[in-house]
Amino acid sequence: MLQKNRDQSPDKPQASARIDFIYLSEPDMVRAGVTDMAACVDTMEEMFGMLYHGDYRMAGVNNNSHGSVVVFPESSPFPTMPKPTPDRRFMAMPAYLGGRFGTAGMKWYGSNIENRDKGLPRSILMFILNDADTGAPLALMSANLLSAYRTGAVPGVGARHLARQNSKVVGILGPGVMAKTSLSAFMAVCPLIDTVKVKGRGKKNLDAFLAWMSETFPQITTVTVVDSVEEVVRETDIVTFCGSGATGDPSTYPTVKREWISPGTFLAMPALCNIDAGMQSPEVRNVLDNPGLYHAWFEENPKPVHNHIPAVGIRWLDLVDEGRMALDQLEDLGKIVAGDAPGRRNDDEIIMMSVGGLPVEDVAWGTVIYRNAVERGLGVSLNLWDAPMLR
């Protein structure tokens, strides 16, 4: 892509000021490889190593913010203002990633759990990718699949380093999109998985998930629908909570109890989660996907922060703040990926990982997909200008 030459000396010709970028629809994204989970897990693993070494930036003065969110009040004098239904928000999530990526980008989305009644996804997402030098747009892309696959890939990175590689049984709470991509990532890194236990709220979502799983992973030969969180967790090698719900009261979040957990269990939690007192024991390893994100959340929100941010990693920081957990009990996935800290040390360790969702993940996977699209001639070329009117 041609950008304006920064060297304005008369003896050097200027590059064209014309800027074109590509639009990638959801079908374009699929053709560009957005659903290639094995490649996505590898990309996320590479990215976490870069995060540990600091070659990234996200929003906020701390460079670790999740993003900037618009929420709506309980009551408003303006009749057209949206009502604060669960998960109703607009959010911008910008980031920069260095290394071979060398790009910046932002995911922008609106979300409302009532979208499902209209036949729409809970969240509707777009992503813009930019040249990190000039700021010029490179691509505007449909981002629901981008976001879903990068989210699911992170538990896969965790499982690669922290689950027993002979894991066979997966327990899932919440059989939605996040469950599909998380299970896909587990299958990519733990190919011996042959059993799934799943708990859902509604028959429609549960039936759809079971049909998808049967078609996608015929090697999963044992599937059990269970009725309780305890059954999801007990006698399970890999556990993941993927359900959505209202925040505000952590006692309503699905809770993991230590007495349910067998030696060697790996728990990857990308959604609402709480823990009992037994899970606060130093014998349980607690891993954050990016410590900076959680510290930023902790700085930015009223205490206890778990009331507002339902990730289990925030519960750990609340416990640190209350003097009931030591800060050095919290580990960094990036440090593990980079080889500066151990992954799973033995078959009996219980390891829990909090998955917060990072804007830099969208930049990493979005850059890979953009470059695939250019190489494959995908997308619609759009012109920003031939020459800018103002400069």
Image (cartoon, rainbow, N blue to C red):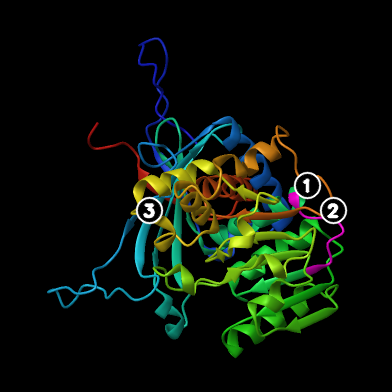
Residues tagged 1 and 2 counted as in contact (Cβ below 8 A): yes
Residue type for callout 3: Ala
Number of other residues with Cα within 10 Å of mark 1, as a class: few under 14, some 14 to 19, many 20 or more: many
Residue type for callout 1: Arg
Residue type for callout 2: Asp
Per the picture, the main secondary structure of the magenta-coloured stretch is loop
Q: Position of residue 133 (x, y in %)?
A: 44, 30
Looking at the rendered structure, which numbered label has been put on residue 344? 1
Q: Is residue 165 magenta?
A: yes
| Residue at (64% x, 69% y) in the render | 179
For the residue labelled by badge 2, is the local secondary structure a helix, a strand or a loop?
loop
Q: Is residue 319 left or right of residue 159?
A: left
Give residue 391's quadrant in the image. Answer: top left
Q: Read off the magenta span.
A: 162-169
Give residue 112's quadrant in the image. Answer: bottom left
Of the numbered discs 2 and 3, the one sitting upstream in the chain is 3
Q: Nearer the viewer, residue 9 or 245?
A: 245
Number of other residues with Cα within 10 Å of mark 2, as a class: few under 14, some 14 to 19, many 20 or more: some
Taking the view exactly as shown, the residue that stands out farthest to the left is: 77
